[in-house]
Image: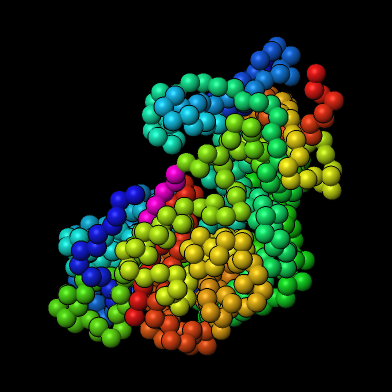
Amino acid sequence: MSSSIDDTRLIICNEEEVQGALVGFKCSDCNVVVFGPATFCQSCTSDNLITITFDSVGSLYSYTEVKVPPHGWPGEVPYILAEVELPEGPHVLAELIDIHHEDIQIGMALKLALIPVEYGTTGSTKIVYKWRPFQTSELN
Amino acid sequence: MKNLKPGREVVVAGVGLHPFGRFRDKPLANLALDSVIAALKDAAVAWKDIQVAYFGHVYYEGMSFGETSLSKLGLTGIPIINVENACSSGSTAFWQAYWGISSGVFDIALAFGAEKVPGGPVSVTSEDSPDRYIGGDHMMAGYALRSRRYMEETGATPAALAQVTVKARQNASLNPYAHRKDTYTIEEVLNSRMIADPLTLFQCCPTSEGASAAVLCAKEALTSYHIDPKRSVNVVAAALTSGSYNGHGSDHSAFSPYRTEPAALQAYEMSGLGPEDVDLVQVHDAATIGELQQLEALHLIPYGEAWAATIEGRTSLNGDIPTNTDGGLLAMGHPFGATGVRMIHETVTQLRNEAGDRQVPNARVGVAECSGAGDVTTVHILTK
Ligand SMILES: [Zn+2]
């Protein structure tokens, strides 16, 4: 079983590794919500934080097609980098997949996708979070 | 936010610059030394008179690199402090020199910066960071996200972004120190290689090599060092801020996604000057969008209007807000540690009326703004 690329940002919820959630913290003192690791509140510095999981659907805030990737990028080039606003407030950057460039629209609904990637040079894999278009038919 | 209370008045007595570009056969210490010697000569101050030195740099060149470089001028035993504050390292060194003198601890100080930045995309995290696998740690992709959002909210056109580069290259063509001196049309900028859309290669600053230096002095101590007060330039504000939480974490918003606004407000309050008093400005244009957003965050142009102001020529040398008069990061290049003091160099040169073909007429108040990773932002205001 592969593990999360970073379990302070993504937890894996089932054995098949297809379900999981972004995680972060909510401050019990000022109610600010932060994506990813935190020991102290980013806003009021309190350490009175509770772990939360985020909604798996957010809206596209901005995007870019990256033609020249950063050093160490293991995926295909070009790739779409998306900034997604979660309903709880935080913005999360990740690759946007399963969409044509011309179909992208700011404000569109995107859903979390968990994808295994080859990690390092040892042949091991890790689960990375990405975004893909959210179909309203996915609502149940 | 704590109000900054200046003590003694501080001036820039001299500035020096090593040209920006690629100098593969010249060690970094020699670049740094050339700029320091130029600044000392410009101020007509001897190295043995300098009481403290602050050195801005980012890439590791060996421990205590500031000491290693300056040791070639002679070992005078003064405190030498190495400063790493991302793209704001040089301007942070300058900020420290200012406060070291203003507070009364030192009379005369050196601030300098030097860097040899490797080619290719710049990332903030280390190679084995999860961000390399997630794909979000890419300096120019971040600027591209800001560009897209800015265009979405303001109606800015790709041509307006490209015009920032066209203007930067025109200014640089008049500056012998610039890395990129050839000029381009809007079409040529838009047709250059795509890096992260909508940003093309010519809209991203080159990573470069270079060095810059400034000698600062207490105004009341000028005569004891025989410094010409007529060529000295006043530092009337020195502000430095880091991040504050915006509710989103990662922020590529259209308006003020950096910490420039709080730094600018501090600087205006400290100087008693306002945006309406500013004659010229150097801002952190690591990408074209950066210049537009920084001009707005400095309150020099209303939010959402800098792109139109750029098209109208207001930010050109003969406009009402001449911006990045030496070519900025886009044409000077961006050797991280050297950039902040390079902005001071240009501001001082303009305020002394010594900028030659790129001189802004009647320049009396200049702003230098520098932003780096970690939301580090410096804003300095200089006057003649
Ligand atoms: Zn809090």
Which quadrant, please, contains the C terminus of chain B? bottom left
Residue B248 visible in rendering: yes
Front residue (pair B82, B257): B257
Judge from the rendering whether residue B41 lies leftward or rightward of residue A136; answer left or right.
left
Front residue (pair B233, B337): B233
Residue B163 x/y as whole percent:
67, 71
Q: Residue at x 55, y 22 (%)?
A: A52
Residue B345 x/y as whole percent:
41, 73
Number of numbered discs: 0
- Range covered by the magenta-colored residues: B240-244
Front residue (pair B143, B125): B143
Name which quarter of the figure residue B269 lies in: bottom left
Q: Residue at x 63, y 72 (%)?
A: B310
Q: Residue at x 25, y 66 (%)?
A: B109
The secondary structure that dominates the magenta segment is loop
Judge from the rendering whether residue B238 lies leftward or rightward of residue A76; answer left or right.
left
Residue A96 x/y as whole percent:
74, 38
Residue A132 x/y as whole percent:
77, 33
Q: Residue at x 62, y 75 (%)?
A: B167
| Residue found farthest to the top | A15
Does the magenta-highlighted stretch encompass residue B131? no
Does the magenta-highlighted stretch encompass residue B242? yes
